[in-house]
Image (cartoon, helix red, strand yellow):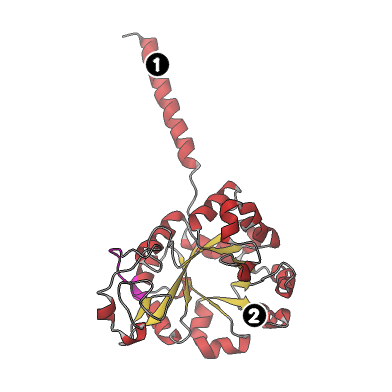
Amino acid sequence: MNHNFIKIVLFLCLFTACSMDDIEDKSPLILSLDQKLNMLKNPQQSDYILVVSHRGNWQVAPENSLASIQSCIDLGVDIVEIDVRRTMDGHLILMHDSDLNRTTNGSGKVSSKTLAEIKQLFLKDRFGKITNYRVPTFKETMQLAKGKIVVMVDKANDSFSLTHEILKETETVSQALFLEFYDYDEVIPAMSKSLFDNSLYVPRVKESKANPQKYLAPFIENEAADAIEIRFSSINSHTLEVIPQIKEANVSIWITTLSSSFSAGYTDQVSLSNPDLGWGKCIELGANVLMTDYPEQLIKYLNENNVH
């Protein structure tokens, strides 16, 4: 066989292998949990935008299901938001609504059913079709998320003590995040000092706050906010006036793009057709964290702009 021909074949094989390595190197980098926490707590160190996925990735699996949470982990979502409810026999499950009607093939209040009864049900997908997925417990959720993704625990207000017990049992307290509306002097009585000190806390600036600067001052002075959510139904909202105060304190700004009442016209729906006019505008305002119902599309947009 011609030796020159062999050399050419070997060269082409090596070139192809190198080219494939280059392609693989360009795939999105999924941060470790420690890196995600570092980005959240130190927003000025990079242009990285953290992505929060609302109720898991319910575009591909039922909301608040383990599959929807796993999808977030696989996509490289930084924070997954879930909702917890207490059963009649004192267990925490994942469920947004107080009843079972919309999201399962069951009916009635969560609080009127035992865990065993709820575990017999199947979750519905976003079209209302019954799936093979079961309702997960909060413990199962934290076991899945452990060491992988930050978990925003919503609707825990009447179950903080039980929530804390499960977080301690699963050794996930430090990756649990609570976004709440309490004034600074109300937080510890509501949550307990241990949960507040050892988990992540995000105060919410609502338009009903007449003086948002005064509301935020003790959180900032005591370094008690890991991020701050700003809600604004208009670009002229007085809540946006706190942005310089937050930036100066090196605290992450969190904007939720689920509806116009949360982020004026800079919503998910606008972003799906023109992300520069939705998510992009939020970033221009100073957002370090974006909460969305469309994590895959948001991550794609952020990757294209080299900020995720």
Residue 85 in the image: x percent, y percent? 40, 80
Residue 49 visible: no
Residue 139 lies in magenta, yes or no? yes
Judged by depth in the image, the label closer to the viewer, 1 or 2, is 2
**Mark 1, residue position:** 7
Looking at the picture, does residue 67 appear above or below residue 183? Answer: above
Amino acid type of the residue that numbered disc 1 sits on in the rendered structure: Lys
- Mark 1 vs mark 2: which is more N-terminal? 1
Mark drawn on residue 154 = none
Question: Which stretch appears magenta?
Answer: 131-140
**Mark 2, residue position:** 219
Quadrant of res 146: bottom left
Residue nearer the viewer, 86 or 18: 86
Residue 99 in the image: x percent, y percent? 38, 80
Looking at the picture, does residue 147 appear above or below residue 189? Answer: above
Amino acid type of the residue that numbered disc 2 sits on in the rendered structure: Phe
